[in-house]
Amino acid sequence: MASETEAAAVIDDGVRRRDFINIAAVSFAGVGAAAVVLPLVNQMNPSADVLALSTTEIDISAIQPGQAIKTSWRKQPVFVRNLVAKEIAEAKAVPLGDLRDPETIDQRTKPGKENWLITLGVCTHLGCVPLGAAEGENRGDFGGYFCPCHGSHYDTAARIRKGPAPKNLVVPPYEFTSDTVVTIG
Amino acid sequence: MSFPWAKNYEPQLPLMKWLDEKLPLPRLVYNAVGAGYPVPRNLNYFWNFGVLAGAALAIQIITGIVLAMHYAANAGVAFNSVEHIMRDVNAGWFIRYAHMNGASMFFIVVYLHIFRGLFYGSYKAPREMVWLLGVVIFLLMMATAFMGYVLPWGQMSFWGAQVITGFFSAIPLVGEPVREWLLGGFVPDNATLNRFFSLHYLLPFVIAGVIILHIWALHIPGSSNPTGIEVKDEQDTVPFHPYYTAKDGFGLGIFLIIFALLTFFSPNTLGHADNYIPANSLSTPAHIVPEWYFLPFYAILKAFTFNFLWIDAKLWGVIAMFASIAVLFFLPWLDSSPVKSSTYRPLYRIFFWILVVDVLLLGYCGMQPAEQPYVILSQLGAIYYFAHFLVILPIVSRIERPLPMPNSITEAVLAKHADKTSDATA
């Protein structure tokens, strides 16, 4: 009888050969299934063409002090703002301890070019485009940018001051190729 | 899984007898929604909304399959393909408006279904699993509706996708990678639109599957009823068919009249004009709001404008919003009162109606810009919402003295009947 042969196969510690086969088969199938899940999950990540980090060149010669323009990089909006001395002074006057995401304006601009504030135009709360880049738009309580979606206020260095956003507007990687041309990316 | 006096399926035609032996599908239907399912005799019209939700899902699936024959899920042409449906496809305007407003009708009947459950204590033992599966269906509906709203690729579609996927970026450390994984890019784009279309097509069938589980779980104890007293014997019940097929059929007629009025005379009232502007990743609409059925949850999200403890405002908002639905999963255990129906719960009944007002207030605040007094109103509304479930319910269910209850459904029905006849003779 089968049960007798099985009983005979039981070794001293109570482990049967069949237990080993069961565990081996289930583990093998489990590892295989997990391996198949990997590409199925990974296909959702940004594809190579999306990842190919494009660079955008911007001519900033036409931006007068106090003005800002909106352009785009990797399909995300970018704000380029030519700060006036008063705005820089305002940004410098704020003690770092008062900031939710403490950064000085020098950390957020290039040396010698501190009037050029270049940030992503993507609110760090839930990703709306804040107002304040175009003439006549609401710049919020701190004279920088204001996100109308959920009411985040950014100051003249595009740092978060009030509202639900956790971080300052992101400064993308960029460099001045000449005095009037900036390359982002 | 049914009462012992449930009628047995007895096929008459030879073909049906043959079929019953090979594949007893008609038997299954007979026992589920036919004369073989005994139902309490005293159900009121609030018990129509489950069937109406099923009808709404069927309408969405049928119109949706047809729309998919004409729609193109590509960011370059999606918006125009929807306009093509509206202008060129034969009867396309009707099918799209029916699908658009069908979503709203689906949520209307589901909200009424949920509040019916809250009022009559349908979530209590032995029907906890019915309630839990219902909350799962509600979550799936929200995901499906959101992804469907993205497909026309208008301004509200795009910015809705941006904001809602932004919720995930609030997760500490892995938030941003998770968001990019969901979007397949840095902003909603072609990859996003394609996957949302794929999932929007899939999820309704998942919903249909969970609905089957929902009904299965319901049919084990049988339907609840307005008295909250369990069925005791045969005289407490009537067969589902023809009694409730007729009653549900009548309700379905009313539902379809309202649906038709909305679709034919006011198809864009519940939508947003901004969604007829093609998606523009560089310009957020001045006033972005979700569809009406998400407004209370959106208000809870917006209520958090300040960092609190070591968690920032953004994460608080997202946690609170998800928690506002997650709390429903615990409802059967938060309310420990053995009395189900609010009819016999004088204290709970008051708080039930305050909750209804609170959810309406949150919905109103969700519609308003992020300014005072709406921020403070949302904050108070959100606090009350959680207090209702986490503080008020557990306390009320302990201190409340319920009203005297009849011994059986039949006794309740006959008492009512006696009242009426004595009124008539007096």
Image (cartoon, coloured by chain):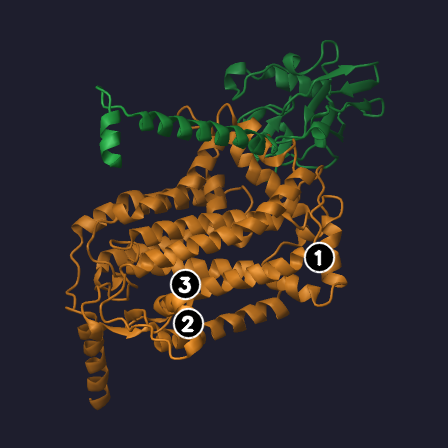
Chain colours: A green, B orange
Whether label 2 touches label 3, CB < 8 Å:
no
Q: Identify which amino acid the numbered label 2 is placed on.
A: Trp
On screen, residue B380 above or below B69: above
- Kindly identify which residue carries mark 2: B18
Q: Residue at x 66, y 58 (%)?
A: B67
On screen, residue B308 above or below B413: above
Percent x, y of residue B235: 21, 75
Q: Which mark is residue B70?
A: 1
Residue B288 seen: no
Q: Which mark is residue B254?
A: none
> Of marks 2 and 3, which one's residue comes earlier in the chain?
2
> Of marks 1 and 3, which one's residue comes earlier in the chain?
3
- The residue closer to the viewer here, B268 or A9, is A9
- The crowd level at tag 2 (other Cα within 10 Å; few <14, some 14-19, many 20+) is few
Q: Identify which amino acid the numbered label 1 is placed on.
A: His
Chain on which label 2 sits: B
Farthest residue to the front: give it.
Answer: A1
The mark closer to the camera, 1 or 3, is: 1
Q: Identify which amino acid the numbered label 3 is placed on.
A: Gly
The CA distance from mark 1 to mark 3 is 31 Å
